[in-house]
Amino acid sequence: MNEQPRHGIRPDDALPPVEPPSAGFLVQLFVVPLTIVSCGLFVVWGFYWLAQMGNDPESYVRALRRNNEGRWQVALNFANDLRGPGGATLKNDAKLAGDLAGILDDEMASGRTSGSGNAAEQAQTLCNYLCRALGEFAVPEAAVPLVKRAGDANNPQTAQAAVEALAVLSANLTAAGKSFDDPAAVAAAVLKASTSDLVSLRSSAAYTLGVLGGAPAIERLRQLVDDGGGDVRYNAAIGLARQGDEAAWQTIEEMLALPDAVPAAGDQKGQAERYRRAMIVVNAIKGVGLLVDATK
């Protein structure tokens, strides 16, 4: 029996022809990994940079003065640092508050918040967080720029942020045994905001008036408990309760009587509304406690 001659498998038969690497292959082999590593290093550097800012408040000021898209994030981080455990020293730095006030004034004067598109949105967000940061201070000087913005009817978003910041600043000053240099000006600005056509601004003003107190604030709160906006009425009632004024009772009863509607599974809007109702009831219960304590 004749056998066919066997030939061993040659290397040339098993391997494809050798070709120079394509540009796409080189991109996958070198450029893509390099990009991933670079992004990772950038993120790590970014966190390190933000961490170092907390140790050097002037670095925050320098970053906020740069005209770039990330300034609003810097302002947010600064506000959080002021509120954090390491913010005690920063809170009492009047010069730092003045620097932030100057940056806020410059941003408002630039007109960027009245534009359109992403740039205007970022400018508005920056101003909101600058107001928030100013509210975290515990020095009377921080009130000056907030009073100025709280009464600005041309920019209701900044006005609302300033009004809310004044409530925080007032609480911080009280805790530090301090007070506003011009409490009448603060009250006047918030009273003006309470007459806005925007429910959200009136609601914030009602809350802040309850924190500020004083005869003009209480008189206005007695009017706001009959406001057409529910949140306005509720904040006004809690403000009156905080001041020990029994005019809050009727609206607090309304808050406690809000029906509890159980949303269907997956109804996120309904779930959010139920949570909001729960928060209103919790605040009403706190209001009852405030009124009871005031009558002791």
Image (cartoon, rainbow, N blue to C red):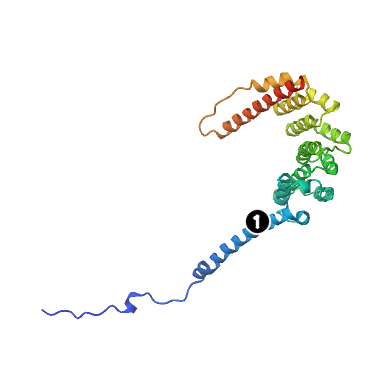
Look at label 1 and name its amino acid. Phe
Place residue 232 in its image quadrant: top right
Query: Between 200 and 75, which is closer to the camera in this rendering?
Result: 75
Place residue 66 in its image quadrant: bottom right
User: Looking at the figure, which quarter contains the C terminus?
Assistant: top right
Q: Is residue 153 visible?
A: no
Up/down of 88 relative to 187, above or below: below
Q: Is residue 200 visible?
A: yes
Q: Residue at x 77, y 39 (%)?
A: 165
Residue count near mark 1 (Cα–Cα under 10 Å), binned few <14, some 14–19, many ≥20? few
Place residue 50 in its image quadrant: bottom right
Residue 163 percent location from the top left of the image:
78, 37
Query: Between 164 and 168, which is closer to the camera in this rendering?
Result: 168
Is residue 130 found left or right of 148 in the rendered image? left
Q: How many marks?
A: 1
Residue 12 percent location from the top left of the image:
34, 79
Up/down of 63 relative to 274, above or below: below
Is residue 110 found left or right of 25 in the rendered image? right
Up/down of 3 relative to 126, above or below: below
Is disc 1 placed on a helix, strand or loop? helix
User: Looking at the figure, which quarter contains the N terminus?
Assistant: bottom left
Up/down of 8 relative to 49, above or below: below
Residue 174 percent location from the top left of the image:
81, 36
In the rendered image, which residue does mark 1 sit on?
Answer: 47
Residue 225 percent location from the top left of the image:
75, 23
Q: Residue at x 49, y 69 (%)?
A: 25
Residue at the farthest left position: 1
Query: Between 86 and 231, which is closer to the camera in this rendering?
Result: 86
Is residue 272 found left or right of 96 in the rendered image? left
